[in-house]
Amino acid sequence: MSLDKEKIKHVAKLARISVDEAKVESLTKDLNSIFKFIEQLNELNTDKVEPLTSILNHSLRSRKDEISDGKIREKILKNSPKANEEFFVVPKVVE
Amino acid sequence: MSKEKFDYFIKGEKGKYEVVIGLEVHAQVLSKSKLFSGSSTKFGADPNNQVSLIDSAFPGMLPVINEECIKQAVRTGLGLNAKINNHSVFDRKNYFYADLPQGYQISQYKNPIVGEGKVLLDMPYGSKEIGIERLHLEQDAGKSIHDMDPSNTYVDLNRSGIALMEIVSKPDLRSPDEVNAYIKKLRSIMKYLGTCDGNMQEGSLRADVNVSVRKEGDKNFGTRCEIKNVNSIKFMQMAIEYEAARQVELIESGKEIDQETRLFDTKKNETRSMRSKEDAHDYRYFPDPDLLPLKLEQKLIDGLKKSLPELPDKKKERFVKEYGLNAYEANVLVSEKEISEYYEEVAKLSDKKLAATWMMGDLFAMLNDKGLDISKSPISAKHFAELVQAIKSGEISGRIAKEVFEIMVESGDNPKKIIESKGMKQQSDPKELQKMINEILSKNKDKVDQYKAGKEKLFGFFVGQVMKLSGGKANPQLTNEILKKLLKG
């Protein structure tokens, strides 16, 4: 796998990271060399190996179905760049 | 019942087109608290009052799964005759939107909790099996409100993090009617199971609708479009009709159909492209590092299976066998859990067949008229059974029963009291009836002679007179018998 400049810009856009046009060239080069290193793993045949999603041999911890949280609106809204007393306020997004 | 033929096709200029539909239904899990946090799921609370630091994605917060939500998903899977996966994985589905504070939705991608299953539909042309592809658990997003401020959007995160089951069907549906039957069946199964309240007004059940068309007889699927987030059966049907016609028009004019996400505009009754979703399919799924794989013990699954309630298909079979109903009656009476429970209560206390007839006739018409669910019926199952028994025993006639029924709706009184206080009891005393009939016959000698001379149509006239004189209370069968006997003599 290798990345071209367009792909870099696309990924940056999806991740909402602003990338300076001047930096795209060097980023492409850096990322491609990282990929090249990782791709050595493809030399191994993993046809019969299940993908590993966790290295811990535990199962998922669960909790009981009880209401134990909420009613902290003030706290929740406090760090919002813009809010009124009840809602987060964001720029108009309409389809 | 004669079987109709399936005939939903879009007629183009160059032939008939079959419509292929698959649904992704999002059903809100019935639970007290959210999928990964302890905030309440109750509908209609003050904005942002049922939000924890997890739901609003504060840094460093860790999700812990609600064990009841897992059980609810397994129960639903079992109700859909589906394979339950002992091993499933939670993934992050990445996209940016104001009502998704995490920047990703926790969902299940490659390894869902429930695999393939099936749902049976009763259509006028026979029963039809709809395949279920999978069911997975995921978080709901918050709610964006666009109409409270001209230049801003308000965000309420109360819904953020509530557990959803996404139920994906195979592309087995072929018409708006089948979609209607499918949603109703899913809803009914989940309500029987108690895993989703099925309330479409409150958004507990909504669907993404995948539509494509192909020439009749074609084996390959056409290019499909996905209509996002439709929240009523009627809108789903309208969206499908519009979308199918649009696609046929494109094909016939030699144009390509773009595989895209569209939205249904309920005011204009049309679907249109959602440009903002262009990049959205690049979700970059990966296993959520905050959550370990979910391992389900077979013991847990077996235990849940044993504790499942009787589901509509089984109940229907039993109603046919135990109560002697026909398939149609049984189907209607099991369609909703509350209806089936009401019927069983009535059937225990009265004639089973007559109870079904009166429920499906007068009771349903009245509920429909008043816009009431059966759980809010002004007539209790016990009173209704008494009414059915009064008809069955001949105490009142069917015609009088309708009057008693009306009074029951108004007053909430029991039928015995109404019948007695209003003197509505059917006249079933042969001596009394005979006296009345003799009186009528002697008053209408001319008509009696005409009848005897062969004008047998007049029989109805005599019956009418008896009903008039008795205030509709004469027992119709007995009246017929006595009239026949006396007219002969």
Image: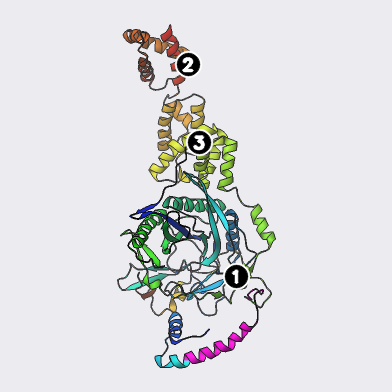
Q: Chain of mark 1?
A: B
Q: Residue B463: image x %, image y %? A: 38, 18
Q: Which mark is residue B23?
A: none
Mark 2 secondary-structure assignment: loop
Residue receiving disc 2: B429
Residue at x-position 44% and y-position 38%: B363
Mark 1 secondary-structure assignment: loop
Q: Chain of mark 2?
A: B
B425 versus B322 height, above or below = above
Pointer 1 and pointer 2: residues touching (CB < 8 Å)? no
Mark 3 secondary-structure assignment: helix
B261 versus B413 height, above or below = below
Name the residue nearer the viewer: B437 or B458.
B458
- In screen coordinates, is B59 left or right of B469? right
- In screen coordinates, is B464 left or right of B43? left
Q: Chain of mark 3?
A: B
Q: Earlier in the sequence, mark 2 or mark 3?
A: 3
Residue receiving disc 1: B89
Q: CA distance from mark 2 to mark 3?
A: 29 Å
* Colouring rule applied to residues: rainbow
Q: Residue B54: image x %, image y %? A: 52, 73
Q: Earlier in the sequence, mark 1 or mark 3?
A: 1
Q: Respond whether the residues carrying marks 1 and 2 are from the same subunit.
A: yes
Q: Amino acid at mark 2?
A: Asp
The magenta segment: A27-52
In this orientation, does residue A87 appear? no
Mark closer to the observer (2, 3):
3
